Image (tube, grey):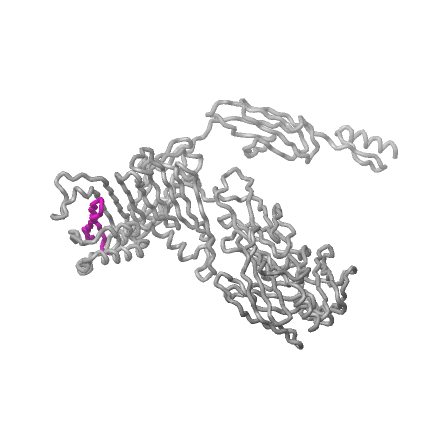
């Protein structure tokens, strides 16, 4: 058995294999060799320089063309007897067979094949190959062709395509280099209409006959302005003058079919200016959602304004525009309206004439003005078409010195010279609206990547946030913006809406510049960059902390066992309004406190003396205030009478402009006298002494006072009423020609004084 196994091993070794023997040994698989025979002008390289493989292994190699002869190309790549497809990147992968293999390559002549050119002309256009009937071309050759539009008034050539690429030509002539494949030439056109718009209607003679006054011309211009968008696609306006301070300008107008109106031209600030500014103005709609106006003057910075377009029934806001208004603004150049402003100088229809073809009528208008220093002559030739649409205007104004005008003959003197000469010309272009290419990108003037900085005004104080954050309920937010883009921030974003689960949590102002916070909770402010790119910034509105306590007493002096009402409030008003009220420990008087259902407090006096009431915010104990209540013993007849008759009562009444010093003497015989002095800016104007009689009611303690002496007109102030507050104080109200001032308090002097001294 052993000898057979050895024999088997030796036999297998001869064949180059080692495999698993019947007695448990192994047999090794054979390796096969790959060699390269590269043809002239080529190289063959094996991956990782490996040239021996087992059966089934993937052989990876690269074929490169080194020949510089453009007439030669790689023709064949063989793996043994197998021909491989030519790979564009030169890389090949083939499974190794169970034998040795040779890779071979060969070059050969390049085969030149012509490729076809076909045409696809858009409606209203033609494509003509310059080569005539030849429609096949060799790769690399130049192909020429011509494109024409049959009627430029009704058809627009949008683009010319060769394959998938748009090409440009000169005066309708185009060229391209033929690729190594068939290619199609295509024209893309837009047909504007059937041509009917280009020819005006016939003039209605009766309409012209009825134009006899300037008012008729005004009505005609109003009609033209209203219907201009249906017929006019553009026009020109120019104004020239010798007046030193008048602008000189010449503009060309274009009305686009994609919601744009453009005018451009030149303007000089005055007749003496030789350097004109280039002017470009565009009004349009951006994505039907935003209205914009762009103005450019070559001597100043560009400006642009934008407004969101809203439905006509939407609430009005100054930063928005109604859809109908926006559509009107971008559909007409407003040429008729420009001439309307000059009609005020014309007062006579001189002549009317219908053109020979019956499609137009001409009005000759005139006017004059005889002024104090000048004599002005106005004239205009105005042409309308049969659809009553303004076609052209030639308007002139001539001004002369009044001395050159003969009032008797109503004519100018023979040698009269103009002092001012103005010329206004206008012409409209009737036809179908075409697409007008903007000379700027509106979004170049609006930020896309920007930060919102928020100024938070709360309780008359400002704080600042970068972006959103936590704010107090009741805050008013305003915003500044910082763009991180390298372009001018001409259009600033605005706040346009609030997103929140809390209804009415915040409101945006009419101009979009501020937001008022009305409730607590989370919300987002939506900002619009002017062209519909929206940014949401998150805020959290919280209940503000109490900052200040305000408290007032209905009466600050009451008798023992009487009551008064204390009213308290917290500033800011959005803070929790709950307060606690207590009597300060060092108070001389005493009082009890009870809270009412309406949030006020009833204070009941229980002991005579000064009571200090401490009112404190429950939310923030650091916020508190004190009010003082004077608790007094009720007055008695004997006490009041003694107080009145044994001393001079004295007190001060403060008003906005002056202080008034009141002195009153009561005598025991029922008579008395008073004097009121006026103190202003440190000086005292002594009043007159006024005599009176009085009574003191024993039960009510009411004091009645009747003036007995003379009161002259110079004594402007008199005593209106007196009332005993306590046995030692009295309330006085003074009167100023029938108007009562706020009451004051009278107290005793050390002794009676002579009011006449």
Q: Is residue 598 above or below residue 383?
A: below
Q: Is residue 135 above or below residue 306?
A: above
Q: In the displayed image of the protein, which residue is found farthest to the right?
A: 2
Could you say where residue 524 lies in the image, as x and y percent from the top left?
60, 54
Q: In the displayed image of the protein, which residue is found farthest to the bottom?
A: 699
**Numbered disc total:** 0
Secondary structure mostly seen in the magenta stretch: strand
Question: Is residue 640 highlighted in magenta?
Answer: no
Left or right of 13? Residue 416 is left
Residue at the image point whose x is 47% and y is 61% from the top = 314
Q: Which residues are magenta?
A: 360-386
Query: Quarter of the image holding residue 442?
Result: top left
Locate the C terminus by quadrant.
Answer: bottom right
Asked if residue 450 shows in the view, the reply is yes
Q: Is residue 604 above or below residue 252?
A: below
Which of the pair 133/468 is nearer the observer? 468
Asked if residue 551 shows in the view, the reply is no
Could you say where residue 439 lies in the image, as x and y percent from the top left?
40, 41
Locate the N terminus by quadrant.
Answer: top right
Residue at the image point whose x is 54% and y is 23% from the top = 66
Could you say where residue 98 lies in the image, as x and y percent from the top left?
68, 33
Question: Is residue 378 highlighted in magenta?
Answer: yes
Residue at the image point whose x is 60% and y is 31% from the top = 79
Which of the pair 598/135 is nearer the observer? 598
Q: Is residue 698 above or below residue 350?
A: below
Could you say where residue 202 lies in the image, as x and y percent from the top left?
20, 56
Left or right of 425? Residue 713 is right
Which of the pair 728/266 is nearer the observer? 728
Which of the pair 483/157 is nearer the observer? 483
């Amino acid at each position: 058995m052993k000898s057979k196994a050895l024999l088997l091993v030796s036999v297998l070794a001869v064949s180059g294999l080692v495999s698993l023997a019947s007695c448990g040994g192994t047999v090794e698989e054979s390796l096969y060799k790959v060699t390269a025979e590269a043809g002239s002008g080529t190289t063959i390289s094996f991956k990782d320089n490996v040239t021996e493989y087992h059966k089934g292994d993937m052989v990876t190699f690269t074929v490169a063309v080194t020949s510089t002869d453009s007439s030669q190309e790689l023709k064949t790549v063989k793996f043994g007897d197998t021909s491989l497809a030519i790979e564009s990147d030169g890389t090949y992968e083939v499974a190794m067979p169970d034998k040795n293999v040779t890779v071979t390559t060969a070059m050969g002549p390049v085969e030149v094949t012509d490729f076809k050119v076909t045409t696809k002309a858009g409606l209203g256009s033609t494509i003509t190959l310059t080569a005539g009937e030849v429609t096949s071309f060799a790769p690399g050759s130049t192909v020429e062709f011509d494109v024409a539009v049959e009627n430029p008034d009704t058809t627009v050539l949008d683009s010319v395509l060769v394959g998938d690429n748009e090409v440009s030509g000169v005066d309708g002539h185009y060229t391209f280099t033929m690729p190594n494949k068939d290619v199609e030439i295509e024209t893309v056109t837009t047909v504007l209409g059937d041509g009917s718009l280009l020819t005006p209607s016939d003039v209605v003679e009766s309409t012209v006959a009825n134009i006899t006054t300037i008012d008729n011309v005004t009505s005609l211009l109003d009609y033209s302005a209203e219907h201009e968008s249906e017929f006019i696609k553009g026009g020109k306006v120019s104004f020239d003058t010798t007046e030193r301070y008048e602008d000189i300008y010449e503009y060309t107008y274009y009305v686009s079919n994609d919601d744009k109106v453009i005018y451009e031209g030149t303007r000089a600030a005055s007749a003496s200016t030789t350097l004109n500014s280039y002017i470009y103005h565009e009004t349009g709609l951006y994505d039907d959602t935003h209205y914009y106006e762009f103005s450019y003057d070559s001597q100043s910075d560009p400006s642009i304004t934008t407004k969101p377009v809203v439905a006509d029934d939407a609430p009005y806001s100054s930063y928005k525009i109604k859809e109908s208004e926006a559509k009107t603004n971008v559909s007409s150049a407003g040429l008729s309206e420009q001439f309307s402003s000059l009609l005020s100088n014309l007062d006579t229809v001189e002549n009317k004439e219908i053109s020979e073809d019956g499609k137009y009528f001409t009005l000759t208008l005139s006017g004059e003005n005889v002024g104090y220093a000048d004599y002005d002559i106005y004239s205009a030739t105005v042409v309308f078409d049969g659809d009553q649409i303004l076609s052209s205007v030639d308007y002139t104004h001539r001004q002369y010195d009044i001395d050159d005008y003969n009032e008797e003959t109503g004519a100018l003197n023979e040698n009269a010279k103009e002092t001012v000469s103005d010329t206004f010309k206008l012409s409209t272009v009737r036809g179908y609206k075409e697409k007008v290419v903007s000379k700027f990108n509106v979004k170049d003037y609006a930020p896309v990547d920007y930060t919102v900085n928020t100024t938070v005004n709360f309780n008359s104080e400002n704080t600042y946030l970068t972006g959103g954050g936590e704010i107090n309920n009741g805050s008013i937010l305003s915003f500044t913006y910082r763009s991180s883009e390298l372009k001018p921030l001409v259009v600033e974003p605005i706040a346009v809406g609030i997103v929140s689960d809390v209804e009415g949590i915040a409101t945006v102002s009419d101009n979009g510049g501020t937001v008022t916070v009305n409730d607590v909770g989370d919300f987002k402010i939506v900002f619009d960059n002017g062209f519909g790119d929206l940014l949401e910034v998150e805020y959290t509105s919280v209940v503000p902390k109490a900052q200040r306590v305000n408290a007032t007493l209905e009466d600050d002096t009451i008798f023992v066992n009487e009551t008064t009402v204390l009213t308290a409030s917290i500033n800011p008003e959005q803070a929790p309004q709950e307060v606690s009220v207590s009597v300060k420990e060092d108070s001389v008087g005493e009082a009890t406190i009870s809270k009412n259902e309406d949030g006020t407090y009833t204070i009941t006096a229980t002991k005579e003396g000064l009571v200090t009431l401490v009112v404190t915010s429950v939310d923030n104990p650091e916020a508190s205030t004190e009010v003082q209540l004077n608790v007094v013993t009720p007055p008695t007849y004997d006490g009041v009478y003694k107080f009145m008759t044994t001393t001079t009562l004295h007190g001060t009444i403060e008003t906005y402009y002056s202080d008034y010093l009141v002195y009153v003497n009561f005598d025991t015989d029922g008579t008395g006298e008073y004097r009121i002095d006026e103190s202003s800016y440190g000086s005292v104007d002594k009043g007159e002494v006024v005599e009176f009689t009085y009574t003191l009611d024993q039960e009510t303690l009411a004091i009645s006072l009747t003036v007995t002496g003379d009161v002259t007109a110079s004594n402007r102030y008199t005593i209106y009423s007196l009332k005993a507050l306590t046995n030692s104080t009295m309330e006085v109200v003074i009167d100023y020609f029938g108007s009562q001032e706020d009451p004051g308090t009278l107290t005793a002097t050390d002794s009676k004084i002579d009011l006449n001294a």
